[in-house]
Image (cartoon, helix red, strand yellow):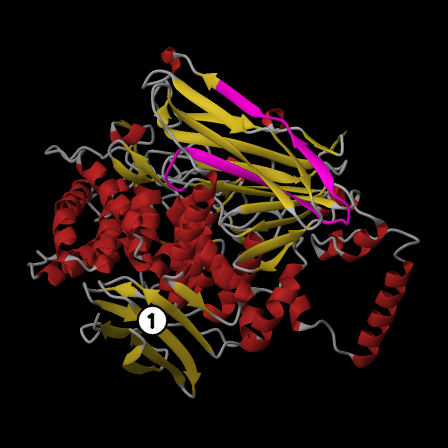
Amino acid sequence: MTFIGSHQVIGSSRASELSDEQTCDTVYSSPTQMHLTAPQCLPHLGLLLIGIFMVLIMGCGRSPSEKLLTESPKSIEQASPQATTVASVNALAKEYHQYWQLAEQGIRWQVGQPHSDQLEMSGLQISAVIDYGVDEAGNTALSRTLVWPMLRTLPNDTHASLMRTFSTSVMPQLTLDGEEVTNRGLVEVIFDGVLTLTQQLTKDVSLVRTLTIHPYEPGFIERWQITNLGEQPVLAVLTEIDYQEVTGAENGLYGRYKIAVSAPAKSQVIAPNSHLINDIVFSAQLVDEMVYIDPTEAIATRHRQLDGWRNTLQFESPDPLLNQMFEFAKLRATESIFATRNGLAHGPGGTRYYAAVWANDQAEYVNPFFPYLGDAKGVASALNSFKWFANYMNPEFSALPSSIIAEGTDFWNGAGDRGDCAMIAYGASDFALSLGREDKARELLPLIEWCLEYNRHQRMENGIIASDSDELEGRFPAGNANLSTNMLAYGGLVRAARLKKALGDDDQGLEQEAQALKLAIIAHFSAEVAGYQTYRYYEGNDKLRAWIALPLAFGFEHHKAGTIDALLSENLWTKDGLLTEEGDKTFWDRSTLYGFRALMKAGELQRVWPYFEYYSHKRLTGEHVPYAVEAWPEGDQRHLSAESGLYARVIIEGLFGIEPIGFQQFMLAPRLPAHWNDMALRHIKAFGADFDIVVRRVEGGVNIDIISAGRVIQQHFWDQGSPLPVTLTLIQP
């Protein structure tokens, strides 16, 4: 499956697939790429000419929404923030096709034209990448690529997970009153943590397919519900499926594996307003292993799992699309945890990255999120990932592996030192503070201290920390010392100092070391790039890079204005988010999400808000839904899971401005959008507590209620200046 970046021409191919009426009314790419056909669109043209004539008479010019994408960030800032933000969605929405609408606890696509998409869902022993949609002939397209990460293939490398793709070849054959049913009639798709496709097979008979992974077993379920909507009984006959494959022992690390797809034969006269249910079970196991999967229990267990995530860390805002995007971010970030033979391990996914950990995806991106959600498996996977890295500490202070693979039994080090110790020192310290547990902090402290010492061994004469590459592993130049590694090393020093203080230990000069590194960063990386006074990414770099957002994310005031302008300029910001490098076409959501968080933290909410709204709405309801993606063109916008953790952190750390400073202490700086009067983050499980933060606009600032067990236990007024320190000692269980 190929997804097209929205900066490309996406309208022309789709327009040819639509009816004349649809072509006039529903295709959006950019304003210059709307496709109108004559004579069907002449009425629209007439209305357009009348509208232009009226605008010229009134002398109104363009509306704020029409100006949004064509004006520079400075002109946007000078406009009324409220008018600009309110208008932003209407203006930006025309830059993509909105296929999906909100549904109960999810999203719905009312099928009206050819379109296809892909999403991933994961459980402890399986991951499923599902391709679905309608082709140009009107046929329902449905393919399931199933991955079993703990059934290791040979060679046992990063990508050695047993994997199979199943399309229509292993599906039951269905006849209705003796006539074989064609695979057409897809009318609706709903995703709410399970994927539901509804087909109208005949005038009177519908087929509803429910697809889900088993949360705990190596199984995937596809339930068929055939319903008679007519007034006469219908005879439905389904053939049996008994597909089995046994792999060769020479191809499996643990010997032979058995892959099975099964569904019973059924024949039933379906009375009016009644239905027939049949379950197709996909599974894989060791050839001599016993695995039992109850489809009904699997579906019920998945729904209980989803309800558990919905009931904690709830984001409440006036924008239901943002609320739902946050819910899906929680889901994708947390479901992608696998029960390896060496403990729980979060994995990015995407049919390639399982039963393995990376210092950026896990230690830096997603692990600091888990304390806020309070998911036990998420916290356990974070602790286990740090344990895996700690196994490679050494007295020579040689670099840690780029990734630890194969269920923690091996490593890959093809990228050399990517700044991994900077990532781990920052992520582990932040995680330990947010978790609020002294015992776990003590467990993590040796790894944190070793990583800080490793960074000192890489310190150059000018105080900058060298590294072979960065998290992009040489895809773009990074010199011998890059801004990302150094900013994360700074963040690690700051948070490690706070962690030491929380533990009652001497910080051993970590605060002073952090300040020295900060001065070295400013001295070495400060530069004028593309006309902006900001930061170069490495010595010799003369193009703007997305990661110049990092100094803002870590609270640097130096070059703040120039960096903000550069990030929001046409040099970097596109309809797909931040370009990795000025002048290139590549985008990675991870740097865009850091950019959102950084700009909000820097107090530039109103300027960045239209972009964040647009990004969120597009990812939730556009061409490829419903999660943050990895990158384009690499990976073809896979739904890697750690990026969803970064999205959730935009809300937690960017919009609400939460930053841990102790086990029960944090800084709070909620940035309330100009057109909102209130917002809340409820059932926050970080800092050893369960509490809500409710923010309401008042004259001169905002009122903040801290609520525990339904009682307001703290009230604060914040003038939206310096962040507000909060201590949770008054919170009772």
Picture quadrant where residue 41 is located: bottom right
Above-or-below relation of 2 to 318:
above
Q: Kindly identify which residue carries mark 1.
A: 692
Q: Residue furthest right?
A: 39
Q: Quadrant of residue 405?
A: top left
Q: Which residues fall within the magenta stretch? A: 215-244
Q: Is residue 571 left or right of residue 228?
A: left
206 inside magenta stretch: no
- The residue at the point 27 percent across, 50 percent down is 379
Which quarter shows the C terminus? Answer: bottom left
Q: Residues within 10 Å of mark 1 (few under 14, many from 20)?
A: many
The amino acid type found where label 1 is placed reads Asp
Q: Residue at x 22, y 37 (%)?
A: 388
Q: Position of residue 102 (x, y in %)?
A: 59, 60
* Residue ranking furthest to the bottom: 699
Disc tally is 1
Q: Is residue 222 magenta?
A: yes
